[in-house]
Amino acid sequence: MKIITFLSDFGTKNSYVSQMKGAAVGITNARLIDITHEITPHNIREGAYALRSAAPYFPQGTVHVAVVDPGVGTGRRGILITTSKQILIGPDNGILMPTAHFLGDFIVYEISNEKYMLNSISSTFHGRDIFTPVAAHITNGVPFEEIGNRLTDFVDLDFGQGEIRENAATGTVIYVDRFGNIITNLTREILSNVLVYNKNIMVFIGEKCLEMPFVKSYGYVKKRDMLATIGSSNLLEISINQGNAAKKLSVKEDDKLEILFS
Amino acid sequence: MKIITFLSDFGTKNSYVSQMKGAAVGITNARLIDITHEITPHNIREGAYALRSAAPYFPQGTVHVAVVDPGVGTGRRGILITTSKQILIGPDNGILMPTAHFLGDFIVYEISNEKYMLNSISSTFHGRDIFTPVAAHITNGVPFEEIGNRLTDFVDLDFGQGEIRENAATGTVIYVDRFGNIITNLTREILSNVLVYNKNIMVFIGEKCLEMPFVKSYGYVKKRDMLATIGSSNLLEISINQGNAAKKLSVKEDDKLEILFS
Amino acid sequence: MKIITFLSDFGTKNSYVSQMKGAAVGITNARLIDITHEITPHNIREGAYALRSAAPYFPQGTVHVAVVDPGVGTGRRGILITTSKQILIGPDNGILMPTAHFLGDFIVYEISNEKYMLNSISSTFHGRDIFTPVAAHITNGVPFEEIGNRLTDFVDLDFGQGEIRENAATGTVIYVDRFGNIITNLTREILSNVLVYNKNIMVFIGEKCLEMPFVKSYGYVKKRDMLATIGSSNLLEISINQGNAAKKLSVKEDDKLEILFS
């Protein structure tokens, strides 16, 4: 089973994504699956979160190509990352790193062997000319070492996993979605022993201290009420049922939060 | 030939749809085809119409997964429906029913066997954790009876087919599209003996009575003129050429209409 | 390796694209790849440019179905075009022609053999009922001559390739993208001997004469500065870094331009 996924900020109004797929199908018979192409242009953190959300649901051996690449055409490098489960390919700007940290046991290679790139490489579209052809060759069994040398000074981006101390947890806001839901780096696993459904918790965030219930889903609180829940990415989220929590609390990405359990 | 289609209100800006596909490709080598993921959030009727429009063009044995699911996380059940031609999987809220009525000879099963779900089931994403894995296992030949018991008290939604009496037809508005075209439940088949191209008909709808031509396509009337036509879903539509018919006639879904043929 | 691509102005909020794919998978096991479905409605030129941009990256034998079709339901013909490399299918309104000129050695056939269409043909959806089934049968090896007779009076649309005279080039604006970038018909090949990176050129366009650098990518000029570059489609583009060049220069499609090299 060969699978390549694609994630980018190219949008879907142009033919760019199809150019990547055209390059892929000329090399491999792998299945091609889109993650999303509507990442906010140049928003590496948003792209990193989307990849981190999707990767756990793909099988062993899946090759992910992620292209949010404000530095294309400058000196930034392209990298291939192997992990214990899947392979990640894209620019060396951090977009791949939260997924690499999550999947674990990762090794970073610089993409340098031109043998596995398109013949004519444009300055502005490495997704099509470099990353996709490399991904396609990898699904055909080309050894990682053929792609380039190992790198240790890659650009890192780590969402972390938060920390638990007795009846408190500290974490970070990794992403605010377009509905204003505040997604934290506190995982279901780390919280499993301290959180109890339908009990209230205290949340210190954005210079405010709020009491809210921890519930299974939005439906358990009234409209406009605040809630904490484990979202579909297995991360703790702070939300307002049919409202915008990030706006109300003036919270943005990278803000810290602390939670007290009763 | 194994085929799974996906329909939802998840949008395409996040990674949710790809999470469903990741779950699918881990189980089956079926072809994965999107119907649409831009159903207006929580609009079951719109989703039901889109599925009903698309299903007739797919081959025997296709498995459709449709997830417009405002009740997720509450007690609503998941169902699998077999018909004489295709298989439908989704929440028990009516979204599958117009297609089931159209395809005919349907049997409804409750989805209850956890053996065919993902190991870790979130409260908020049954599309990924339950419906898609079940669909994937079905394409691998798992018998329907393995999924759960037969249900008879499912939530029904039937667009009906209208009624013909001599030189009149009565029907219902099943959907208003984003251009304001009024799509009725009157099928090409039921009208084939009474409608004649380029002849005028009288339409009683929204407390108005209007005369308009029945034509092959929009191009047969002048700009801003009203027309009746059989749309690409083989249903009678009332439209204004380059205008918004629903707005002009104050017509909404579920409204009745009557047509007189001369 | 069988591949069918799809390009249209149908949007992605309805089920139309999936109806085409449903028709395809009932006939062929070819891989199905979307180019884009968000061409501005009825904009044949924009569709033609998108197809021309994507086709070069697809393998020999790929069948492209392009449906921007304001004339559907009238007498306009459907055509199949063979080239030395790929096959093009769509309405006879010019949308396929820039790609045919680019791929070269093309022959145009009228699509007339009903044996290769769906049984029931709607007046308004030839993409599903005619073009896709024909494309699917072609991937199964049906000879081109079986589809219909050769045509010579097809509707032509040719973006041309510009002209080089000593230290000047004359060309045409073929497309303005949604960011205001001005895409010309001057190819990388025709300019390769005269353009030198990081040297200034004079551009006569839209009744203005402007000096700007020819650079590898946007990053080489300051914000709001004008630049000329070879875009990812291998065509010369005039742009403003983070600005709208077409607006500033009052340039529109089909305008002429002249370039002087120092």
Image (cartoon, coloured by chain):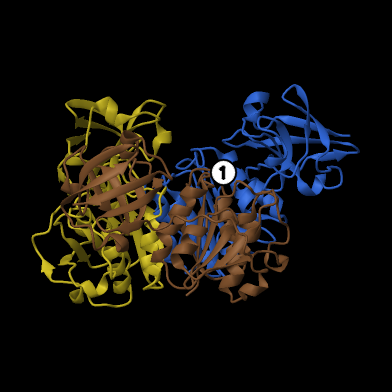
Chain colours: A blue, B brown, C yellow
SS state under label 1? helix
Residue at the disc numbered 1? A47
Q: Position of residue B17 (x, y in %)?
A: 55, 53
Q: Position of residue C197 (x, y in %)?
A: 33, 39
- In the figure, is residue B210 to the left or right of C6? left
Toward which corner of the image does residue A117 lie, by quadrant? bottom left
- In the figure, is residue B239 to the left or right of A107? left
Does C136 sit above or below residue A261? below
Q: Is residue C246 visible?
A: yes
Front-most of B186 and B76? B186
Front-most of B11 and A99? B11
Q: Looking at numbered disc 1 in the image, what kind of residue is underneath it? A: Gly
Front-most of A29 and B19? B19
Q: Residue at coordinates 30% horizontally, 37% vertically from top-left?
A: B208
How many numbered marks are there? 1
Does B110 sit above or below residue A128? below
Toward which corner of the image does residue A25 lie, by quadrant? bottom left
- In the figure, is residue B165 to the left or right of C98? right
Front-most of B1 and B207? B207
Q: Position of residue C137 (x, y in %)?
A: 30, 73
Q: Residue at coordinates 71% horizontally, 56% vertically from top-left?
A: B121
> Mark 1 Cα within 10 Å, few/some/many (few <14, many 20+)?
many
- In the picture as drawn, the residue positioned furthest to the front comes out as B166
Q: Position of residue B33 (x, y in %)?
A: 47, 61
Does C74 sit above or below residue C132? above
Subunit bearing disc 1: A
- In the picture as drawn, the residue positioned furthest to the left comes out as C153
Q: Residue at coordinates 69% horizontally, 45% vertically from top-left?
A: A231
Q: Is residue A149 visible?
A: no
- In the picture as drawn, the residue positioned furthest to the right comes out as A166
